Image (tube, helix red, strand yellow):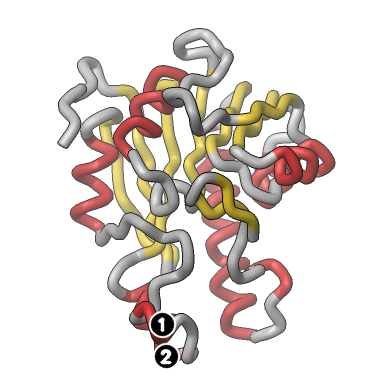
Amino acid sequence: MQQADQVVTGNVFDKKATRHPLERRVVAAFDRRLAELVRGLAPRRVVEIGCGEGNVVSLVKAALPGCFYAAADIDNELLEKSAAKGADRTVLIDLEKPLRLPFPDRDFDLVLLVEVLEHVPSPESTLAEAARLAGSAIASVPFEPWWRLLNMLRFRYLVSLGNTPGHINHWGRVGLHRLVARWFRVERVETSFPWLIAVAGPLAVPDTRHD
């Protein structure tokens, strides 16, 4: 885990390395579902905002070996890990500037926001840039309040009532749907417990109002 200007990057808890059988099962189920969703959309060009250690890069590259994959994050060390796992291009996000990646409008078939929206100060700005870059999106977030409850049942982060460090935004199913629907046409919000996954297509006229 690293921190850049109050935005926590990387994994606080390394889900990939856990030895707990139940944790391994739920992580594997999430990975399988994410790979199925991406494979079903069959994108040729994918961009991931908030790529972290590159776990999703390797997952998507295994599902779609021929796709072009661009990975963006705020930490150079994480970008190096993503490149090692198959990213074709990496982009460093500058937190001092409004989010805008160096790609033309709709340059990608799919944008991935996997466990990133809960970390960013402005999810609306992140989704606005996602909608500029691609017509389709897959976004996953922790399923609240279950996520925090499960943390407390594991005796983790009790002082913060189960809130994982770096999680500054929280959504249930309805809240995630409403958020993503401002920028995309939400096809469905499904559960891969304890995560929610929103699958969305292009919206004719994005809602540019910011709360």
Is 93 on the left-hand or right-hand side of 66?
Answer: left
User: Closer to the camera, 62 or 152?
Assistant: 152
**Which residue is at 57% across, 46% downward?**
4
**Which residue is at 19% across, 44% downward?**
178
Measured from the top left, where is residue 70 in percent x and y? Answer: 65, 27
Quadrant containing the N terminus in the rendered view: bottom right
Measured from the top left, where is residue 140 in percent x and y? Answer: 43, 51
Quadrant containing the C terminus in the rendered view: top left
The image's mark for residue 60 is none
The image's mark for residue 153 is 2
The residue labelled by disc 1 is: 150
Measured from the top left, where is residue 141 in percent x and y? Answer: 41, 55
Q: Secondary structure at mark 2?
A: helix
- Residue 61: tell me if it is visible: no
Q: Amino acid at mark 1?
A: Leu
Note whether 188 is above or below 183 in the view shown: below
**Tags 2 and 1 in contact by the CB under 8 Å rule?**
yes
Q: Amino acid at mark 2?
A: Leu
Note whether 96 is above or below 58 in the view shown: above
Measured from the top left, where is residue 97 in percent x and y? Answer: 47, 24
**Which residue is at 65% across, 85% downward?**
20
Circle 2 Cα neighbour tier, 10 Å, few/some/many (<14 / 14–19 / ≥20): few
Circle 1 Cα neighbour tier, 10 Å, few/some/many (<14 / 14–19 / ≥20): some
Note whether 49 is above or below 128 in the view shown: below
Q: Secondary structure at mark 1?
A: helix
Is 81 on the left-hand or right-hand side of 53?
Answer: right
